[in-house]
Amino acid sequence: MFKHLLEDISVVFERDPAARTTWEVLTTYPGVHALIIHRCSHWLWNLRLRWLARFCSHLGRFLTGIEIHPGAILGHRVFIDHGMGVVIGETAVIGDDCTLYHGVTLGGTSWKKGKRHPTLERGVIIGAGAKVLGPITIGMNAKIGSNAVVVKDVPAGATAVGIPARILDQVKIQVQDQMAQIFPAYAVGDESNDPMNLVMHALLNHSAEQDKKLQEVMQQLEKLGAIIETDSEVGNAFDVHHLNEIVD
């Protein structure tokens, strides 16, 4: 227990620049308090003292605003920053070195018994307000953007954003992380890597290219004497540069 406590305190200094002293962390950080209480409630849960474990967990929720079911399994050096509104379900598994921000839900999507909550592998970061739902797996060192809703597995090292969550361009994300060399607070991603944005840009550019070729064909037909009527208003409305800016 004492070893866990030392790890909980040290990880705060690693990931929160606002932390100043050990006493401050120990007395004013609800994420640290929630982890201490959870270890007690989880110990009681494993002893099959289920009501007492739930009551201990309930007290922790009242004191910290963080609800962790006593059946949930948490690894070493888990960091819950701010913490208000965090909900972690009974069958959730959180690996070592994971980070959760306020408003995160690791919830279930079924009323059936058995595994129904997410598994977070080592080093996962879940941004503020994100909802990770169902018996899915978030791969090692993956990042979930703030307010994302994740209902499918996320591969290791990937960044997922949006509702429903989509996987961003992993190559660009890795290059940015290497260049920045900083802790990616709130798992913020580059929206320009959003696959939906990339698809929209590709379609707009393809449409503009087709329109250009069509104009060339019409010019050749006019040279041959064909009378062609065009709708200038439609052409003016389809400004590919303006539409690309809107998509961004």
Image: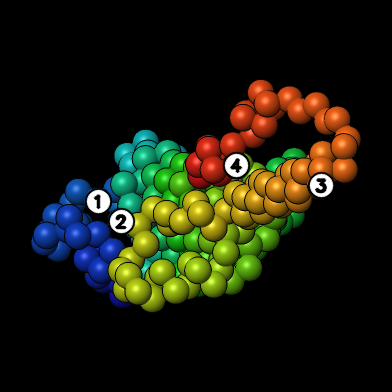
- Examine the rendering and report whether any part of residue 42 can be seen: no
Q: Position of residue 191 (x, y in %)?
A: 49, 51
Q: Tell me if mark 1 has few (under 14), some (14-19) or many (20+) residues whose alpha carbon lies within 10 angstroms of its own.
A: some
Instruction: Point out the tag, 4 or 3, that comes first from the N-terminus.
Output: 3
Instruction: Point out the tag, 3 or 2, that comes first from the N-terminus.
Output: 2
The residue under label 4 is 240
The residue under label 3 is 220
CA–CA distance between discs 1 and 3? Answer: 73 Å
Query: Residue 38 lies in what quarter of the image?
Result: bottom left
Picture disc at residue 29? 1
Give yes or no for contact between labels 1 and 2 (Cβ–Cβ under 8 Å). yes
Asked if 230 appears above or below 134 in the picture, the reply is: above
Instruction: Point out the tag, 1 or 3, that comes first from the N-terminus.
Output: 1
Please tell me which residue is depicted at 44% across the width and 65% down the height of the picture.
Answer: 98
In front: label 4 or label 3: 3
Asked if 138 appears above or below 227 in the picture, the reply is: below
Q: Secondary structure at mark 4?
A: helix
The residue under label 2 is 32
Q: Secondary structure at mark 1?
A: loop
In front: label 4 or label 1: 4
In front: label 1 or label 3: 3
Query: For the residue marked with disc 1, what is the amino acid?
Result: Tyr
Q: Secondary structure at mark 3?
A: helix
Query: For the residue marked with disc 4, what is the amino acid?
Result: Val
